[in-house]
Image (cartoon, rainbow, N blue to C red):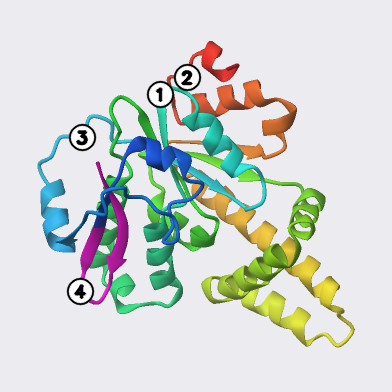
Amino acid sequence: AWLLTGFDVNTRDLTFVETTRETLASSAFIVGRTPLSRSGKTARISLREASSRLRGVAIDDNIDRLIAHVGFCGSTLLAQALDATAVCQTFKEPQVITEISALKTLRHPITQDEDEWRRVLDVVKSQFRKAFGERAPITKLSNWPVNLLPDLIDANTRAVFLTAEPREYMLAILRGGDERVSFTLTFARKLRRDFPRVHAAIGALEKDPRMTRWQLILRCALIVLRVQEQVFESVGTRAGAALSLDGRTLVTSPHETLAAVAGALPLPIRRAERRA
């Protein structure tokens, strides 16, 4: 099968690699540093050609199943649990979606052209709606493209939003050491560009001479968490169905959580598979 891995905004070309379901299932993330093709075969196709192929094509399952999350909250565990069933194919944090979210952050001219931007979104969404055999496709986003959720979610979307309690979220960041702390601060700077209210809030913290480094880190973490939750609350009303979960339930009540996820997306997961 061919997987969409990149979009060149300058040439308007899409890049695909030849891969297998097993390779994707064994990969924690579908990002540039992850080897996805054993054959090494790639293909490029123009955005307009890909868009024209969508017109007139009958789609059996016109549902976009999305998992969005705040980060460090168990989303990878959920994706792995779904992949372990015989009925799901989870696309874990596709790099191409993160790339097009960067275009929106930068306010690239393509995002200001309503028709062309819609063409990009429709083509990308269609590629992660394709099933491998009889398996239901699910896209687990990175939390980085949270700014793209209003563009991705509509009445055809079935969404699960994973979040965390503030204390648990801060502890998860601290347990991850410098790497997670650095990511959180970088993500906060990105959100400053995506959302004006975040720019003002974090700017005030950085200018406060009384603020220690750790106070700044933890307060930025709380802002990052709350902004993501507010986006989930806003876009959830647009979805055909949406479920919000605390990531801890994956550990405290895994069978019930998988049943709730299966009902929301929806997925034909039998009771025996939830307990396997």
Give the secondary structure at mark 3.
loop
Q: Amino acid at mark 1?
A: Val
Q: Which residue is mark 3?
A: 59
Q: Quadrant of the N terminus?
A: top left
Is 71 placed left or right of 31 in the picture?
A: right
* Badge 2: residue crowd in 10 Å (few <14, some 14–19, many ≥20): some
Q: Are marks 2 and 4 in contact (CB under 8 Å)?
A: no
Start-end of magenta stretch: 1-15
The answer to whether one can see residue 158 in this image is no
Q: Which of the marked residues, 3 or 2, is nearer the chain's N terminus? A: 3
Picture residue at 29% right of the left edge, 53% below the top: 4
* Badge 4: residue crowd in 10 Å (few <14, some 14–19, many ≥20): few
Q: Which residue is mark 2?
A: 269
Q: Amino acid at mark 4?
A: Thr
Give the secondary structure at mark 1.
loop
Q: Which residue is mark 4?
A: 11
Q: Are marks 2 and 1 in contact (CB under 8 Å)?
A: yes
178 lies above or below 212: above
Give the percent coordinates (x, y) of residue 59: 20, 34
Q: Which of the marked residues, 3 or 4, is nearer the chain's N terminus? A: 4
Give the secondary structure at mark 4.
loop
Give the percent coordinates (x, y) of residue 48: 14, 61
Give the percent coordinates (x, y) of residue 200: 67, 79
User: Which of the labelled discs sits on residue 87, or is there none?
Assistant: 1
Give the percent coordinates (x, y) of residue 86: 42, 22
Cα–Cα gap, marks 4 and 1: 37 Å
Q: Which of the marked residues, 4 or 1, is nearer the chain's N terminus? A: 4
